[in-house]
Image (cartoon, rainbow, N blue to C red):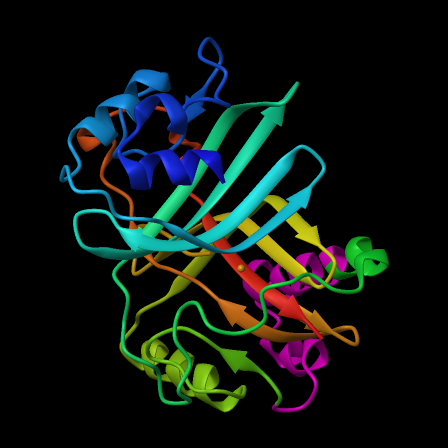
């Protein structure tokens, strides 16, 4: 929270207060490495202060993952993952996208529940979402899609979406006709707190590497989904070579 406050206030000292200056790895390929990359990023922002609103924040062990919105060279919506050691941030992943109008079901990229529930179910919900990605995206067993959802009860926050499973199913069929294939690589990590789970995995659409991001779970089923999409620059265009940024971060809610 302090880091976001510092960025919004254009205060580099505040933004880096809890960063380990000697051991900080930033996986954003658009950012220069180390703490100096954060400081330089802030120095190049428009000088007027622009508060960043953290919409959701969850903790899983020494990881914190957030969804926020604010003005960074224009309005943006973004997800971030932070890894901590001894109370200091030592590693960071993120992606961002432009906000979009409400989708076909009236949902924006940031509305919906914000507080984690069913904290005792964290491990089971993480296992459910991991099984979903393994079964559907890695094994390609689309016939089992329905087993992870409560009928057609599925809330979507992506721009081209609409609630229910029929909309993403139709989109996938249309993409298949156009030979647009979404490929998901290995799952790098699955983070969660209660009924919110975030997945990090390498992915691409039509062979273009990209970042996505979280899922909400209810009653053992995937109930809600948020994400952003961001293309990853080619290797020779990156400002740092900490290439773990090739990840699909998708957050959702299990209900």
45 relative position to 111: left or right:
left
Residue 193 rendering spot, x and y as whole percentages: 70, 53
Identify the residue at image location x=43%, y=58%.
183
Residue 26 rendering spot, x and y as whole percentages: 40, 27
Taking depth in this image into account, of 22 and 247 the one nearest to the observer is 22
86 relative position to 137: left or right:
right
Identify the residue at image location x=39%, y=73%.
158
Identify the residue at image location x=36%, y=89%.
104
Residues in magenta?
Answer: 126-152
Using the rendered view, name the quadrant where residue 16 is placed: top left
Quadrant for the C terminus in the image = bottom right
- Above or below, 241 against 139 in this view is above
Please say whether residue 208 is visible from this viewpoint: no
65 relative position to 42: left or right:
right
Q: Look at the image and say whether residue 227 sits in the magenta stretch.
A: no
Using the rendered view, name the quadrant where residue 137 is placed: bottom right
Taking depth in this image into account, of 19 and 152 the one nearest to the observer is 19
Residue 167 rendering spot, x and y as whole percentages: 44, 87
Identify the residue at image location x=74%, y=58%.
194
Residue 236 rendering spot, x and y as whole percentages: 19, 28
């Amino acid at each position: 929270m302090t880091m976001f406050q510092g960025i919004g206030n254009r205060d580099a000292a505040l933004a880096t207060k809890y960063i380990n200056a000697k051991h900080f790895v930033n996986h954003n390929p658009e950012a220069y490495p180390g703490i100096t990359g954060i400081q330089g990023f802030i120095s190049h922002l428009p000088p007027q202060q622009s508060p960043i609103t953290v919409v959701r924040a969850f903790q899983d062990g020494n990881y914190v993952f957030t969804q926020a919105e604010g003005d960074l060279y224009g309005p943006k919506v973004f997800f971030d993952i932070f890894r901590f050691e001894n109370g200091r941030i030592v590693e960071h992943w993120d992606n961002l996208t432009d906000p979009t109008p409400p989708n076909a079901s009236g949902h924006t990229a940031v509305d919906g529940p914000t507080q984690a529930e069913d904290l005792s179910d964290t491990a089971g919900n993480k296992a459910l979402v991991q099984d979903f990605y393994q079964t559907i995206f890695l094994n390609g067993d689309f016939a089992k899609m329905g087993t992870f959802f409560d009928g057609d009860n599925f809330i979507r926050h992506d721009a081209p979406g609409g609630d229910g499973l029929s909309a993403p199913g139709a989109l996938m069929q249309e993409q298949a006709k156009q030979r647009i294939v979404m490929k998901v690589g290995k799952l790098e990590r699955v983070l969660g707190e209660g009924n919110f789970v975030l997945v990090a995995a390498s992915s691409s659409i039509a062979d273009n590497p990209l970042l996505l991001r979280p899922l909400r779970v209810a009653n053992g089923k995937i109930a809600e989904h948020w994400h952003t999409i961001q293309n990853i620059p080619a290797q020779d265009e990156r400002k740092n070579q900490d290439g773990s940024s090739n990840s699909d971060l998708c957050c959702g809610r299990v209900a």
